Image (tube, rainbow, N blue to C red):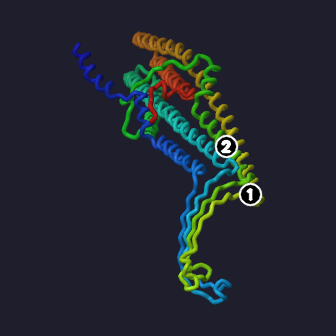
């Protein structure tokens, strides 16, 4: 009872402080620069919408210029005049028609905003899967490392036993050498497992900086998947995957850009309101005696301005062709994304289902191997089994444990992959993307 109480005191703080996989994903989404980059891109596109809508509003220009002017014209009887010229004007221009440039520009920008918004979700979705992958790698490699350490301890124990027998003259030197070779191999496997574990920690810290070990993480369990057949899962992925949403929004933007590039082929119509004030222009002094009644040259006008560009060096045609190719590119990107997501959804589902079946047999294998190890140990004590026999069954038991651990984590990863490819991982984990 005292031992149980002591064990509880030691384990409870560890369980309380352990980071769940959901907490890891939430923290990654909140702090990773990749998400911040996507958010800033969204903010940029939102601001550019104001620029696109500017075409609906009038443009107001104020101008004032002053400086010396030397002029000889018929207005001043051919006498060169040196005056200080001043010009001022206020012009308001309102576009009435510009070949649907503004309307399509706004439509294009709204599509880009939608793409950027979906880009945030896409990045969060991918980051969630990356976080899960590295999180599970830490736990898996730690378990494999522990198995390798236990395997070394077993080899070390048997090596000591056979060494005693050889020294006592009742053991064979070849058995000792073979056991030593296996012990050395077990050590090399342990170091490799340790290296994999350390590397997985470094990979996890790229997502979530800060010292972490397997003891800081809590092993998750497999939950429910969105559907129980491949066809349904693929359909859900085609509807919900944020990467597909990004590509669809990009196609909308490319379509609008293609239509917008036809604007230069239309005439333009603007209303132009102008007020102006001039002094000492064209060599005529406004304060000269002959023009003393006229203090300044001023006026205003209201004009309907029509303009039509008939040739622009093939630039407009090239722009249309370029936008047409961009649209084709975006369509191909969507097709490629659908193929990728479909294939990986199918792979994840097959892995999820087959590892479930595999684990049933691996559980039986581990259990049977453990019982066989116990039986071999008893038979060894009775002189019916050699240490080499024990090492052989221990190797089988060790390999079964490794395969079981690997299969467990492959199934866990496949579960989260299914959630990610179907666009459900953030919702299922209740992760908030602000």
Relative to 344, say whether 285 is above or below: below
Q: 54 or 159: which is nearer to us?
A: 54
Q: Residues within 10 Å of mark 1 (few under 14, many from 20)?
A: few
Q: Residue at x 29, y 22 (%)?
A: 12
Alpha carbon distance from label 1 to label 2: 22 Å
SS state under label 1: loop
Task: Tell me what residue is drawn at x 37 percent, y 40 percent.
Answer: 210
User: Label 1: which residue?
Assistant: 308
Q: Nearer the viewer, residue 68 or 23?
A: 68
Which residue is denoted by mark 2 in the rendering?
256
Instruction: Tell me which numbered mark, 1 or 2, is placed earlier along the sequence.
Output: 2
At a point 62% along the width and 38% down the height, the residue shown is: 249
Quarter holding the N terminus is: top left
Q: Secondary structure at mark 2?
A: helix
Residue 297 point in image, percent of width and height: 58, 74
Observer-side mark, 1 or 2, equals: 1
| The furthest residue to the bottom | 79
Can residue 188 be spotted in the picture? no
- Give the percent coordinates (x, y) of residue 57: 57, 51
Work out whether residue 112 or residue 370 is closer to the camera in this orientation and state it. 112
- Location of residue 69 with respect to 297 vertically, above or below: below
Numbered label attached to residue 350? none
Instruction: Describe residue 12's horizontal placement relative to residue 380 as left or right.
Output: left
Q: Is residue 186 left or right of residue 83?
A: left
Residue 99 in the image: x percent, y percent? Answer: 70, 49
């Amino acid at each position: 009872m005292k031992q149980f109480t002591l064990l509880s005191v030691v384990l409870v703080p560890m369980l309380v402080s352990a980071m769940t996989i959901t907490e890891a994903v939430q923290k990654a989404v909140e702090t990773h620069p990749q998400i911040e980059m996507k958010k800033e891109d969204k903010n940029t596109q939102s601001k550019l919408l104001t620029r696109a809508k500017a075409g609906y509003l009038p443009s107001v220009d104020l101008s004032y210029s002053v400086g010396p002017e030397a002029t000889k014209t018929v207005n001043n009887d051919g006498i060169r005049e040196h005056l200080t010229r001043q010009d001022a004007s206020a012009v308001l221009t309102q576009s009435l028609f510009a070949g649907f440039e503004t309307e399509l520009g706004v439509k294009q920008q709204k599509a880009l905003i939608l793409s950027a918004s979906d880009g945030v979700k896409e990045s969060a979705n991918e980051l969630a899967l990356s976080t899960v992958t590295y999180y599970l790698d830490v736990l898996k490699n730690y378990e494999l490392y522990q198995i390798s350490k236990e395997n070394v301890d077993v080899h070390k124990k048997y090596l000591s036993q056979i060494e005693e027998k050889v020294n006592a003259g009742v053991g064979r030197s070849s058995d000792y050498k073979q056991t030593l070779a296996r012990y050395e191999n077990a050590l090399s496997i342990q170091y490799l497992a340790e290296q994999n574990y350390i590397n997985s920690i470094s990979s996890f810290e790229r997502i979530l900086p800060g010292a972490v070990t397997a003891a800081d993480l809590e092993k998750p369990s497999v939950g429910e998947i969105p559907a129980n057949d491949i066809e349904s899962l693929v359909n859900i992925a085609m509807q919900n995957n944020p990467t597909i949403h990004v590509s669809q929004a990009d196609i909308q933007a490319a379509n609008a850009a293609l239509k917008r590039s036809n604007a230069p082929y239309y005439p333009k119509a603007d209303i132009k309101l102008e007020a102006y004030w001039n002094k000492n222009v064209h060599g005529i002094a406004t304060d000269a005696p002959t023009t003393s009644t006229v203090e300044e040259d001023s006026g205003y006008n209201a004009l309907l301005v029509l303009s039509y560009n008939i040739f622009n060096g093939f630039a407009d045609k090239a722009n249309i062709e370029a936008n047409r190719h961009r649209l084709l590119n975006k369509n191909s990107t969507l097709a490629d994304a659908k193929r990728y997501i479909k294939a990986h959804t199918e792979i994840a589902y097959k892995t999820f289902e087959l590892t479930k079946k595999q684990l049933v047999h691996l559980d039986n294998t581990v259990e049977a191997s453990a019982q066989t190890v116990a039986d071999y140990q008893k038979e060894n004590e009775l002189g019916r089994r050699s240490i080499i026999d024990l090492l052989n069954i221990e190797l089988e038991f060790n390999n079964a444990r490794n395969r079981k651990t690997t299969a467990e984590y492959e199934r866990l990863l496949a579960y989260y992959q299914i959630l990610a490819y179907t666009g459900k991982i953030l919702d299922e984990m209740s992760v908030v993307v602000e």
